[in-house]
Image (cartoon, coloured by chain):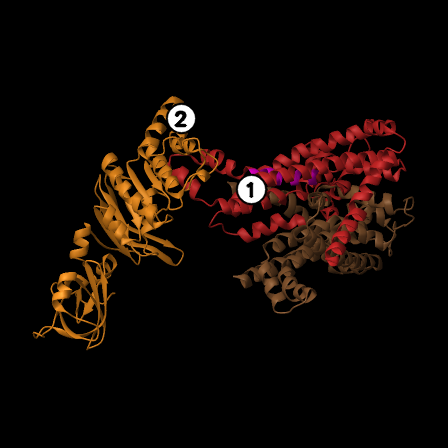
Chain colours: A brown, B red, C orange
Amino acid sequence: MGLGIAVSYLSLLVLIPLAAVAWRSLDGGAGAFWDAITSEQAVAAMRLTLLVSLGAVIVNAIMGTLIAWVLVRDDFRGKIFMDILIDLPFALPTIVAGLTLLALYGPNGPVGVNIAFTRIGITAALIFVTLPFVVRAVQPVLMELDREMEEAAASLGAGRFTTFRRIVLPALVPAIVSGVGLSFSKALGEFGAVVLIAGNLPYRTEVASVFIYGQIESDGVQAAAAVSVVLLTASFLVLLGLSVFERRMTRHAE
Amino acid sequence: MLSRLVMRFTAIAFLLLMLVVPLALVGYLAFEDGAGPVWDAATSPAALSALRLTLIIAVIAVPLNAVFGIIAALLLTRPRLPGRTLLSVVIDLPLALSPVVVGLALVLVWSRNGWFGQWAIDQGVQVIFATPGMVMATIVVSLPFVVRELVPVLKELGTEQQQAAATLGASPPQIFWRIVLPAIRHGLAYGVVLTTARALGEYGAVAVVSGKIAGRTETLTLHVEERFQAFDLVAAYTASIMLAILAVITVAVMRLLNRGEH
Amino acid sequence: MSILATGVTKNFGAYTALDDVSIEIPGGSLTALLGPSGSGKSTLLRVIAGLETPDVGRVEIDGTDVTGVRPQDRGVGFVFQHYAAFKHMTVRGNVGFGLSVRRRPRAKIRERVDELLALVQLEGLGDRYPSQLSGGQRQRMALARALAVEPSVLLLDEPFGALDARVRAELRRWLRRLHEQVHVTTVLVTHDQEEAMEVADRIAVMDHARLQQVGTPKELYEEPTNPFVMGFVGAVNRLGESFVRPHDLELRQVPNGVTHAARVERVTHLGFEVRVELEQESGGALMAQLTRNEAEELGISEGDTVHVAPRRERVFAGGDGI
């Protein structure tokens, strides 16, 4: 009975609606689907999405690892607040995230920097909403990491940077990859955080999700559905690849 | 030890510039002309109606996802379930979905010329541009959280306690209410908090299905965007502060639950 | 109350856990199911409890067919190796659980729980949580919990397996005394032959999903029906075609026609017992147990050649199973 309920719930809310998207994307045949996803505007949107998502996850891979390191290995007053702060982007509505960034770095911001309607701005918004993923993936691994390994490396004459590069970093790589994968998948589809900052200038600051939204609003539903299928597939493949990677890693560790 | 300090201050500076200062600035800007405008914005009919709708949606979506989450997690941890991997993949699917795609998917099924739309209208239910569609959108985007929290907890719990209860004469409902539910209550609460946070804060999926009719299908997040576009920054910032306070409460509750676990 | 299992077979996928097992367990007895891990003993216990359904065969408790009956309705008490303590309940809550799901009045439950806590020597610990108890205390709590509903049979699955040696020995003696007090038909699963011999009045030896032999500890030791049972319940030597216990090997200085020559490899003095390791001239190691007096009379030392003969031996038809 439980299985029946679960399957009905998922079918009604997830599977049937997604089937409708796939169906609609093929409205007019495979040719129309191909035309929709290769239209100049759609290609520009998807290319931009890829670009800003990559930018955001690269920043997060570095900053996330660094923050995790500080949280685990450093000790200073107020560290607990820093730790709590990391969860905030998980809980804060994405539209609010975008709005706060605009308040500080927008046209009327007090610092005189304007990232509104720029790719930098979109990247910053994506960094904001995916900030916790790498930190929260790396932090527990770093806590478990055997310090004796580092001491052994040091006793063998390795300098601090060498120890980090040869001993610590390899141990953290699976966690970083996992955090980056989740961030990337989230960034590909992000809408709320970027919608205010992007300003929806076609070819320039229009990411895929904003493109889809615009097409829905302007009755380009078939094009919206087609790009949705591409976006969904990409995001799904990232998560799938991640789970395969994680499974291989755990097998390796045993 | 220089590098340690450099790293510490890099981390702090990054968080300050990305998170703290922007949020604080929103608070400052809202109150720039005193508390009066903020109070007016917070108690305006549009804001109150948005708050009410946000809460209504959460009150429907969160319990449904909690019940579904428990059922699905029990299924996923059952020792011999055919198609378990498939079920697990479908449950995680919303994590890979852009909120806009979720909205589009629901529109294609439930709008007037969608698959079930006409049928729903014949039953006297309007789904798209109305509360039912917004509830559905919210359910989909917040669907995986309870399941993902409960599966590891149930795995850890194992089946022995349930078997012990069975040999002591407890019926399956008794086993659920008296053994399983108390044992997973922390994980469930954590999952419910995450679900609630997502339900209160969802923007994209709800934006697509709502039609953004002010005073009728506008949630708090939609209200933020609508006021911002209307250059009513105080109202946009005020609604943002309300949502940020809910987020801070969420994070605080998550902390407390995490501590209770250990 | 007696238990009767007839022709029970249970497969898990391609793996056969029980292969046509039939056993009768008399009412009021304390029977041990003894065997190496993977022999099917735990599965048999779980089939009796109703936690597993046999593919073929039937189970009767006290003459009633319970094969299709849910564990809830079988009236069995089950104790798990890892206690299966209800972690979110106090000791009282755990022990009273079976009565409380039967909706007995509170005062009655309280009274019965007090009685049981006294029986398992946990008085005064009723308001603690399982995490505040030692392993031995938790297992006694689990026993009290199983006994609370006055089960017709008590089933123990490696109940002392997770405890350290000292506590284990203590609990064995305690279980034996408890059984004498409450006299409920008890089945104990164990892989430890010493534990089975010490606690049980009957032992059923299992191996490779099959029942090998059932009997009293003495019967199994003295008259095993196959080499596996003989080797599993005690040490054994192979001498030609026959199997001999170490204390049934006679060592002589002079050959007498039936003896086998062997070289003394090592002599170990263990107080009253002297253990002699030998190498047969025809190949194959032997171990002999002598008393201190016998060893002194014999006057052997390492490197000597002695002649061994069995005082008692067993020969199995086609037996080649150690």
Q: Residue at x 39, y 30 (%)?
A: C124
The vertical placement of C193 against C109, above or below, is: below
Q: What residue type is labelled 2?
A: Arg
What chain does mark 1 sit on? B
Q: Residue at x 79, y 48 (%)?
A: B18
Percent coordinates x, y for residue B22 in the rendering:
82, 43
What chain does mark 2 sit on? C
Percent coordinates x, y for residue C104 in the rendering:
38, 25
Question: Outermost residue, bottom direction?
Answer: C281
Percent coordinates x, y for residue C84 in the rendering:
42, 42
The answer to if B188 sits in the magenta stretch is yes
The one nearer the camera, B83 or C103, is C103
Magenta segment's dominant SS is helix
Q: What is the magenta range?
A: B186-199
Q: Which mark is residue B262?
A: 1
The one nearer the camera, A50 or A208, is A50
> On the rendered structure, is B16 left or right of C166?
right
| Residue holding disc 2 | C103
> On the rendered structure, is C46 left or right of C203?
right
Q: Which amino acid does label 1 sit on?
A: His
Question: What's the distance in space between the residues labelled 2 and 1, CA to CA?
Answer: 33 Å
Instruction: Using the rendered view, name the quadrant where residue B214 is placed.
Output: top right
Look at the image and tell me in which quarter the N terminus of chain C lies.
top left
The one nearer the camera, A122 or A74, is A74
Q: Which mark is residue C238?
A: none
